[in-house]
């Protein structure tokens, strides 16, 4: 599309009223838009500086994709994010944040002050990936797609943050809210949201949160699936398989426990799940096992259902060791429950300003909002603290997340940073911030 035509189309789009995408194509309403918020949002998106910034994000998207590729090729497994963090910090400083820093947990933190006296909004994308440091992450382009592990999750989010900072600085836009931008650690696997937990511990002034994670702008994640993850560690005396026969076995006890847990019943709604994910133990084929361990993942969209499942799983293990001890008449097996992951359940109400702003941004960009979603993301932490929080995607198309065949296509990928810019609604001299201060 010629640049002049693109500008005209963008101008017409941004002057149309917010309404359409708060409903599905079938007419089902997803988000009830507050008329006052609609008025303020429309004032922001009609501002000439905002329109110019949105256009620049489209014009310069190729630069964002190039940065995304560079970030992709820097390894960042959980607890080994430092190389990527240092690179991201330098890119932040280049954008006019000389005081940006890496905190004690490893998060990159940069603050863009507002005009004062307003709310504080934290915007983050996670630095870590699920892949080990020795996996080949060279980006290959074929058939219109970029292929590489971690090309989307969440390297796209980091690139989106950098693009948004670029246009904020160059467009002379001043927000009333203080904005904190972060590339955070510990979102994946055993990272256990440690980066976001540290950020909210260190910044109690935060009134709202936006996580930019993954690709495909389709929904607004306003619910947090909670999880409790444990290692069940079984201990016993051990001994020779023939000479010490008659001693209870840690592996036998573990097997009994797994069998009992496998029979647990959980509700379909609220969705509640479990799986014994890994097992380990024993010394050799001719030894009675002195130790055994399995890792258990339990998830739910409801706090009480998750707590009940945890009690039942632990009770099953305790019954299993009692049965194993009774089988051999010796009280020698024990079990320890080691917590290795705790992601809290949470929810942000659709009437919240961050959900409203995101829904209106979908409208403004002409993207179909397919629904509100529940997932396990960095937003779980603020949601559990009753701080308004959402997770949105960074734009473009992609697939194969968490696999070596992960791919990204920059189809309309500029809409990711455009979305983020619009959700920051509350420009000095144009409108009041949609986000309200919380009495922390």
Image (cartoon, rainbow, N blue to C red):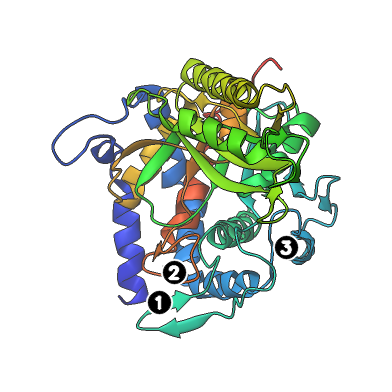
Of badges 1 and 3, the one in the foreground is: 1
Total labels: the figure holds 3
Q: Which mark is residue 408?
A: 2
- Foreground residue, 124 or 313? 313
Report whether 1 appears left or right of 57. Answer: left
Please indicate, yes or no, whether residue 274 appears anywhere in the rendered image.
yes
Q: Can you see residue 187?
A: no
Q: Nearer the viewer, residue 283 or 396?
A: 283
As drawn, the label of residue 227 is none
Q: Quadrant of the C terminus?
A: top right
Position in image of residue 226 (x %, y %): 53, 30
Helix, strand, or loop for circle 2?
A: strand
Q: Against 148, is 288 above or below? A: above
**Residue picked out by circle 1:** 145
Name the image quarter holding the N terminus.
bottom left
Q: Nearer the viewer, residue 23 or 56?
A: 23
Under tag 1, what secondary structure? strand
The 10 Å Cα crowd at callout 2, few under 14, some 14 to 19, many 20 or more, is many
Residue 197 is situated, as x and y percent measured from the top left of the image, at 71, 35
Q: Taking 211 as reference, is 73 above or below it?
A: below
Mark seen at residue 88: 3
How far apart, in angstroms, are the residues tagged by discs 2 and 3? 20 Å
How far is mark 1 from mark 3, CA to CA? 24 Å
């Amino acid at each position: 599309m010629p640049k002049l035509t693109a500008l005209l189309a963008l101008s017409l789009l941004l002057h149309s009223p917010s309404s359409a995408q708060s409903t599905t194509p079938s007419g089902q309403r997803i988000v009830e838009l507050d008329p006052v918020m609609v008025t303020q949002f429309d004032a922001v998106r009609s501002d000439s500086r905002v329109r110019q910034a949105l256009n620049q994000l489209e014009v310069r998207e190729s630069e964002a994709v190039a940065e995304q590729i560079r970030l992709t090729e820097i390894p960042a497994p959980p607890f080994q994010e430092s190389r990527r963090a240092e690179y991201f910090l330098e890119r932040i400083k280049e954008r006019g944040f000389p005081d940006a820093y890496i905190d004690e947990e490893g998060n990159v933190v940069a603050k863009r002050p507002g005009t004062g006296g307003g709310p504080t909004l934290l915007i983050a994308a996670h630095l870590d990936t699920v892949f080990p440091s020795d996996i080949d992450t060279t980006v290959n382009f074929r058939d219109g797609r970029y292929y590489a592990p971690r090309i989307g999750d969440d390297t796209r989010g980091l690139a989106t943050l950098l693009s948004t900072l670029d246009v904020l600085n160059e467009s002379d836009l001043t927000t009333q809210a203080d904005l904190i931008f972060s590339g955070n650690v510990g979102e994946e696997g055993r990272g256990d949201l440690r980066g976001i937990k540290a950020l909210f511990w260190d910044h109690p002034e935060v009134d709202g949160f936006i996580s930019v994670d993954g690709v495909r702008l389709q929904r607004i994640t306003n619910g947090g699936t909670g999880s409790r993850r444990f290692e069940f560690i079984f201990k016993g005396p051990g001994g020779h398989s023939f000479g010490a026969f008659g001693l209870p076995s840690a592996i036998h006890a573990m097997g009994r426990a797994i069998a009992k847990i496998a029979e647990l019943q959980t509700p379909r709604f609220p969705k509640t799940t479990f799986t014994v994910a890994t097992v380990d133990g024993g010394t050799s084929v001719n030894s009675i096992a002195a130790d055994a361990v399995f890792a258990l993942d339990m998830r739910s969209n409801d706090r009480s259902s998750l707590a009940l499942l945890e009690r039942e799983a632990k009770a099953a293990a305790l019954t299993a060791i009692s049965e194993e001890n009774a089988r051999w008449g010796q009280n020698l097996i024990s079990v320890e429950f080691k917590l290795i992951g705790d992601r809290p359940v949470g929810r942000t109400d659709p009437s919240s300003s961050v959900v409203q702003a995101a829904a209106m941004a979908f409208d403004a960009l002409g993207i179909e909002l397919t629904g509100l979603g529940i997932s396990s993301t960095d937003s779980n932490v603020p949601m559990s603290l009753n701080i308004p929080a959402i997770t949105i995607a960074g734009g473009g198309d992609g697939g194969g997340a968490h696999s070596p065949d992960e791919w990204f296509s920059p189809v309309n990928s500029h809409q990711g940073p455009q979305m983020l810019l619009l959700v920051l609604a509350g420009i000095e001299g144009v409108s009041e911030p949609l986000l309200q201060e919380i009495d922390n």
